[in-house]
Image: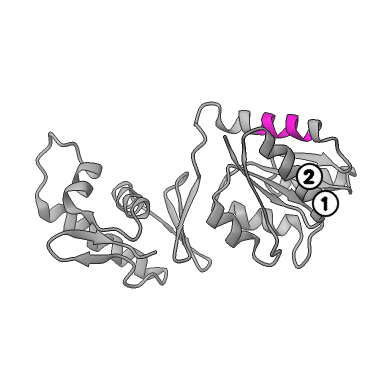
Amino acid sequence: MYKILIVEDEPLIAESMKRYLLKWGNEVECVTDFAEVLKHFVRFSPQLVLLDIGLPFYNGYYWCAEIRKISQVPILFLSSASDKMNIVMAMNMGGDDFIAKPFDLEVLLAKVQAVLRRAYAFLGANPSVMECKGAVLNLSDMSVNYQGQRLELSKNEFRILQLLYEHAGQTVSREQMMKRLWDEECFVDDNTLTVNINRLRRSLREIGLVDFIHTKKGVGYQIDT
């Protein structure tokens, strides 16, 4: 089962695609607020985006560029403007394929399955981003994006933050963190974790994430939902 996000402003087309893709066992959502496409993308964390070019507020090229800032998730463009220029533009903007309207739903499904197969055959269908309080953790390139700023993380910073995201709203013990970061067989001074946490906090502050990680005295650390 894959999570598919449909960004199509014609309700009948969007609903017919949704019903058809649901029948094949996928989890599908349709964007309804076309001024907030990226927020819906981050919240739903899809494995594929079906993206119309002609949309209210901003066109599909704009939203493709915004998604590409934080994720390499496959994007399949939809458009009735199927001339060569639009196809080339869609591919150059980071699209993975293009399907011209009107299209048969069986043809759409074949395209969807082909794109998913290429993207996930060897990786598994895992989400590519996680989000908490507007901060987007990109699992594919170990970065955090917040209010237009991007922070590249070290391996340990990424592992700490990923663990906190996975347990957002809950306290993660120091023991859990040390197990995630270092081999259990290897002796690591407890202060090493503190050093890593402090370094991560300083880095997060540089992009405006102040007090993002909370210390739960005597227990561990937590980020709020």
210 over 80 or under it: above or below: below
Q: Which residues are magenta?
A: 108-115
Majority secondary structure in the magenta region: helix
**Residue behind mark 1:** 12
- Local packing at callout 1 (Cα closer than 10 Å; few below 14, some 14-19, many 20+) is few
- Count how many numbered circles sit on residues in the image: 2
> Can you say which quadrant of the picture contains the C terminus?
bottom left
Give me the residue at 67% from left, 39% from top.
22
Return the residue nearer the eye: 162 or 84. Answer: 162
Give me the residue at 80% from left, 44% from top.
88
Question: In the rendered image, is residue 91 in sight?
Answer: no
Answer with left or right where residue 192 lies relative to residue 203. Answer: left
- Local packing at callout 2 (Cα closer than 10 Å; few below 14, some 14-19, many 20+) is few
User: Residue 161 in the image: x percent, y percent?
Assistant: 34, 54
* Residue 193 figure quarter: bottom left
**Residue behind mark 2:** 16
> Can you say which quadrant of the picture contains the N terminus?
top right
Q: How far apart are labels 2 and 1 at the CA level?
A: 6 Å
Q: Dot 2 lies on which element?
A: helix
Answer with left or right where residue 21 lies relative to residue 197. Answer: right
**Tag 2 and tag 1, C-beta contact below 8 Å:** yes
Q: Dot 1 lies on which element?
A: helix
User: Residue 144 in the image: x percent, y percent?
Assistant: 44, 57
Quick check: is 134 in the magenta stretch?
no
Answer with left or right where residue 10 lies relative to residue 43. Answer: right
Mark 2 is on which residue type?
Ser
Say the numbered circle drawn on residue 105: none
Mark 1 is on which residue type?
Leu
